[in-house]
Image (cartoon, rainbow, N blue to C red):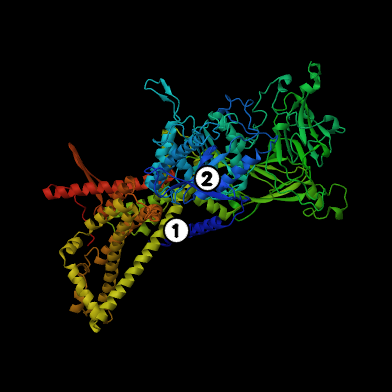
Amino acid sequence: MQGFKAKFRVATLVAVAVWTGLAALYGLLKPISNGCIMTYMYPTYIPISSPVGVSSEKYGLYLYHEGWKKIDFKEHLKKLSGIPVLFIPGNGGSYKQVRSLAAESDRAYQGGPLEHTFYQEASLTPEEGGVDFDVAGFQLPNRYTCRLDWFAVDLEGEHSAMDGGILEEHTEYVVNAIHRILDQYRASYDVREKEGAATSGSLPKSVILVGHSMGGFVARAAIIHPRLRKSAVETVLTLSSPHQSPPVALQPSLGHYFARVNQQWRKGYEVETTRAGRFVSDPVLSHVVVVSISGGYHDYQVRTKLESLDGIVPSTNGFMISSTGMKNVWLSMEHQAILWCNQLVIQVSHTLLSLIDSRTGRPYPNTQQRLAIFTRMLRSGIPPSFNWKMQSQLASQKPKHVPIKDVKHTAAACPSNVHWSDDGLERDLYVQTTTVTVLAMDGRRRWLDIQKLGSNGKNHFVFVTNLAPCSGVRLHLWPEKGTSTSNLPLSGRVVEVTLKMVSIPSGPAPTQIEPGSQTEQAPPSAVFWLGPEDMHGFRFLTISVAPRPTVSGRPPPAASMAVGQFFNPEEGKIEFPPLSMLQSFYSHKETLVKEDHPLALNLSFALSLGLLPVTLSLKTVGCGIKNSGLPDEAAGNVDNSRLCKLRCFPPVALVWDDTSGLHIFPNLYSETIVVDSSPALWGSTRDSEKTTVLLLVDPHCSYRTSITVSVTAASSRFLLLYSPQIVGFSIAVIFFALMRQARSWDLDLPIPSMLSAVESNLRMPVPIFFLAIVPILVSLLLTSLMSQPFPPFASFIIVSVVCYLFANGFIIILILVTQLVFYVAAIIHIFIKTRWEVWEGRVCFGSFHWFINLSSRFSSLKVVRVLRVNPLLVTALTAVMLACLVHPALGLFALLLFHALGCHDMLCSFLTASFRSHAWRKELFGYKNKGNDGSRQFTSKFDEKSNQRLPLEENSSNSLDSPKSFGDSQLEIFHHRHGMLILHLVAALMFAPSLVAWLQRIGMGQSFSWFLDSALCTGVILHGICNSKPEFNYYPFSFPGIPSREVRLDFVYLVAGYYSYLSGLALAPYRAIYVMAAIGFISFVLRTLQRRNREKGEISFGSRKHSHRH
């Protein structure tokens, strides 16, 4: 690598890669506050015995019991009569992690269902079968009739996310555990019946599965297991579980197992028909409901994109929800915190208890009923997607033109059992402004003229409050005056829309100096939205606030608030273009929002906040105090004014994410907004490219908004989202560098070093276009051929190229580190060898001579001599045996040792030849100038001893006609072997997690590795052996009747690089191992055929003449 531009290009890439990695590491390790409350319990774990020959000796099954009193295990097992729930721990997890869920389930059963509120509740969408489901006839239970019996499997904390074989063994044991649990209920029932105890109720026929992390995937894998009893599992709930692909998709068998299970799930939801198309039976998995709960953007181990059920489970049988949009939770949490976060654990416990039919004491058999319970208990009433102009809660549930007398039957009316008296309301207030404010529970009804206030495009109404619906505030739509001729009384023509209020999380309550005093405005806890379709045909909207004494059973809020407004959505749009967001890396982007602005502001970010998280800050700069007539000293500093805090309610941000749905940020004054969207991926949709933030701010106040892109958060998100892509690109970078080396050998040019080859592939415009852009265009072509939706074109190309450049930086760092190690080791080796030759001649070491003699005798053995003559055969046999009989990673490590020794020998030969050549030239020639003509006279000082120390090739290649010296030839071989070492080092690192899991299981009954992994590693080993020399640079092909052809190795590496690039785009870097193994097997077969043809004397293609001397 020569030239300032080349060195600058490499240095810049390395600096950016290191800086991004360190920033991402800092962002990931930085402690975060998730807002979760700890769960406490008194656990007891009762072991469940397994039949001989069924259970694995290293795994176990336990039943959880909550309570501090000591119990008799056998007596407790006799009383089993609840609903069985099996908890499956994840990667490295423990069966004791069930304690939080089991303890809260026990408390929920004893305490009864959650208190009913009157907020808008979520319901099944039409895609989920909500059209055919009778919502009115289905209600959640008023009491729990049966408890949950929590079981947990002990999987010895094995790392199932690192090895496909371990994952399959866990699946086998979970199937056995399910059968054992059902058999235990039968045994307990028989014992009670034999002893004459009460045996009311029926035996459970299915087990509810709850899996955390990889345990969720194990649960799905167990359902399609051929040995599982029919209908033994009908409900699956997963917590932070990957479903689309493994979190670390490096091992081929792991990725293959995921793909196979997902493919069987897709077939399981297909209707079985004959070849003629006649109906045979319903889908095999039509009775199974799967719900996936993700931890949100704080879960670094499993990304939300992987937890999606899209393409695996149809919307009629399951959905995914993020904890950030989960009712009564509204928090993002880490991977382990999802198991003990009290807010989430309580909601999950009540959800599972609600699945039990109070009439039968068993879970609802109907799939839609169970899915409806999950929807109502977990989802928020706010839609999972938001459209600023067209989305409306009412419009989606009734036609646009409906007679007023028919609208009265809407389900938005408060129930009659909630105490409310219109007679208790004081005189009415007629609001003349587009904004209405309530600062106290004053018992008044406020009238708003829809036609007057909703004119001039202000045809949307939004209302935020912290008053409870029905008991604290009620909203009604009143007909026009011209409809008074109707035969219905006025009360029958009024439509109540109170129950359209949607709950949102409220921030901490304002501090009170003394009881009843209000020092700052309360945060809103509900939002209400009406569109023009909702108010069509009505003249007035009334807001009725209850007087304080009417709230019974609980004290009213210390600080009451409600703000409503008619507004035009077009006036509340604030757009942040890409350039503005990128500039905020180093400068703040500020926007002033003046008073009398829309209550709902629509912030549109052109770049997804899933890729570039921003810190959104809101600073109150005014609240109308200076126009209130107060003296200047009373107005004072607006920022610190008590009156401003009293008047402006805390802002709330609602963010809709394409991947996980809703995110809500209450009390937003300065917050880093992150979403879970995964933009610019091959499977991304165009909606994931942008992010819309709905900001609810007080229209009486003015704000200064600013955004700043968080560098550490952006770096962390980049590596988390695109790390599988970067791994696949890294292998492609190595293949492209090997292609450059093979091409140089084919053209009779010096073989460049790996660093020079990588740098050459980064040059503009031709190399970067064909190696970085063309594979992206190929992926888009494949997308078109498969009739799949296209990703966002510009961002997809830009982010993919950035990932490719980052992969180049990573490989350059790896090259520099390994090259430094080899040079240091070679210099130390030469130094020790030189010193040893000096010491050997001066000092006599008896022990060393004895050791040398013993080594000489050992080397003279016939077996050793045969092994030394065939190093390739010895290496191949050793590596293949380790890969097949022990672990694939060990076979690759043996191959790496072979490459490392070869690189070391070549580099030592090069450095020795260089040092001796320099000394020989210095001793051989002396310069002596004679006369004024400047002619030189050469005097030889060469002695015979020096000549004997130089290799024969070195002596014969010092003439002017010699094309290449011995040292240069050794250096070129080093470059070639170094490239092979880098490629196979990355392959070995991809199997390193599996090796760690294998080492953990030593002494626990090891089994052979997966055949797929062993076969692929054998192919990789053959690639390293067969292509260990640069002259193996072609593949001859001959078929009967077709002239013989040869495929050059540079073309093979180009195709392999493209395949690895596409594997990275598909987030499946493990597929790059396939192409390595394919090259290895093809090389082995062709080399074998070539040797056989040579032994028969047949003509075969030979390597092209090359001027390098070896």
In the image, what residue type sits under mark 2?
Ser
* On-image quarter of the C terminus: bottom left
Residue most toward the left?
1097
Mark 2 to mark 1 CA distance (whole Å): 41 Å
- Which residue is identified by label 2? 240
Which one is in front in this view, the residue at disc 2 or the one at disc 1? 2
Q: Is residue 933 above or below residue 238?
A: below
Q: Position of residue 180 (x, y in %)?
A: 44, 40
Can I make out residue 795 in this image? no
Mark number displayed over residue 9: 1
Q: Residue at coordinates 26% horizontally, 70% vertically from top-left?
A: 913
Q: Position of residue 870 (x, y in %)?
A: 20, 59
Disc 1 on helix, strand or loop? Answer: helix
* On-image quarter of the N terminus: bottom left
Q: Position of residue 718 (x, y in %)?
A: 51, 50
Tell me: 1039 left or right of 610.
Answer: left
Q: Is residue 912 above or below residue 529?
A: below
Q: Residue at coordinates 33% horizontally, 71% vertically from top-left?
A: 827
Q: State the residue in front, 1095 or 845.
A: 845
Q: Position of residue 612 (x, y in %)?
A: 57, 49
